[in-house]
Image (cartoon, rainbow, N blue to C red):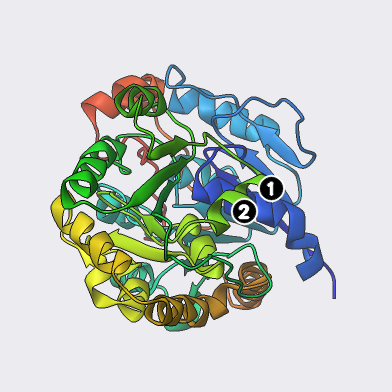
Amino acid sequence: MSAIRVVHAFTYFHALGGVSSILRRNWEGDARHGIASQFLAFFEPDDHRAERVRGLDLTWRNTIHQARQRFCQNLPSGAEVVTYSNVLGMPFFADLDGASRRIGILHGPWPDQTKHVRSVRGFLDGVIAISSQQMELAARLLPELAAERVAFLPNPSGHDGFETQQPPLQDRPLVVGYCGRVQREQKRVERLPKLVDELNRAGVSYRFELLGSGPGLAGLRRQFAGNPNVVLHDRRQGEEYWQVLRNWDVLVFVSDYEGVPISLIEGLSVGVIPLFPRIGSGVDAYVTRVKPDLLYPPGDLTAAARALQSLARLSEAELAALRRRCGEIVQPHLGECDLAAMSAFVRRIRDLPQISCAAFPPRPFYWSDHCPFGLLRRLWPAGFWRGNLAPTNR
């Protein structure tokens, strides 16, 4: 079986976020599943840190016109399939990619996602999504895609099997952790000090740990300074990362919106109980299966603290039962499930007839093509990535 030549395109390859993490798994494991992959990172320099990865070195000062030039200069030749994570860049790169098939990967909701996905009608041969909600969104907004052209992509756990090694809770604090990008946008990490205050007010014996980095970390260091119950680990990788995660009892999120965070799946794989806001994400079904009251009202840190207080009062048998449920839920995410699903879907789409736009009209002059991305984002916040490229067969 010959390998399929695939180019994966996204904003970043080396970043901390979940999409970048998945792309790095593709980089490491695609070949084992019959895919010869290369990667384009729009906003990273072409620094040769990883073979088969090319950076366009774009910034918010660049324009769509410049981005298109750099895309052409760096695009690997002979790609059969191009995947666009969260369909970013597709409207003004699709006429340049030369692929016979295009796949959009929907990793989760973001502001104005509906408008953005609608804007790529006619460009896609298939969509693979990380949750049933994202699959339903694709089916609703892209009706030209038959059911066989929309599939589920399980976020990877990073483990081949389930394990749990938390010591008994008796005579020790409940260990509560936050893992991910430390930023206000989407993640709302400025809410974490309020959560800690509520735990103090409720008299919960706890240790709060943060694992990650980002622009909000310095502010949290100042706010948590002198609190003996708070540990800030910064970013960890490899076994150091897993050593921290395995010691947690609970993984908490305070986000405004999410898909299915990889950190949550990784936590489930080592028996860490999730606490998540009820924001209508793909996580709701996971958390409800563990314990329904672990979904709390968005932004209500008092309710989140009450849920943690309730967990701290459970018996060891009850906590063990919750951890076993974590293990049951994470089964579809173990091993190389994501790589196998991606490979199978790419082959299916390659074997189906092409329905994406194959011939594009000449791109006329657009004033927006010559405005910096930063200016477009302010003037056109709902569509700065959409461009104005219209397929001929929409």
> What amino acid is found at the position of numbered circle 1 in the picture?
Gly
Task: Residue at 58% x, 27% y: name it.
Answer: 69
Decide if residue 391 is on the left or right side of residue 17.
left
Task: Residue at 60% x, 34% y: name it.
Answer: 71
Q: Is disc 1 placed on a helix, strand or loop?
A: helix
**Residue 359 seen by the camera:** no
Vertical placement of 2 versus 177: above or below? below
> Residue 35 in the image: x percent, y percent?
75, 63
Residue tagged 1: 238
Q: Name the quarter where the N terminus is drawn.
A: bottom right
Question: Which quadrant of the view contains residue 386?
Answer: top left
Residue tagged 2: 242
> Residue 351 in the image: x percent, y percent?
65, 77
Q: Name the quarter where the C terminus is drawn.
A: bottom left
Vertical placement of 235 versus 394: above or below? above
Q: Are marks 2 and 1 in contact (CB under 8 Å)?
A: yes
Question: Which quadrant of the view contains residue 57?
Answer: top right
The local crowd at label 1, few if under 14, some if 14 to 19, many if 20 or more residues have their Cα within 10 Å, is few
The one nearer the camera, 164 or 76, is 164
The one nearer the camera, 205 or 326, is 205
Question: Which quadrant of the view contains residue 236?
Answer: top right
Q: Is disc 2 placed on a helix, strand or loop?
A: helix
Vertical placement of 387 versus 217: above or below? below
> Residue 278 in the image: x percent, y percent?
22, 63
> What amino acid is found at the position of numbered circle 2 in the picture?
Trp
Residue sitting at the far top: 61
Residue sitting at the far right: 1
> Residue 289 in the image: x percent, y percent?
35, 80
The one nearer the camera, 256 or 374, is 256
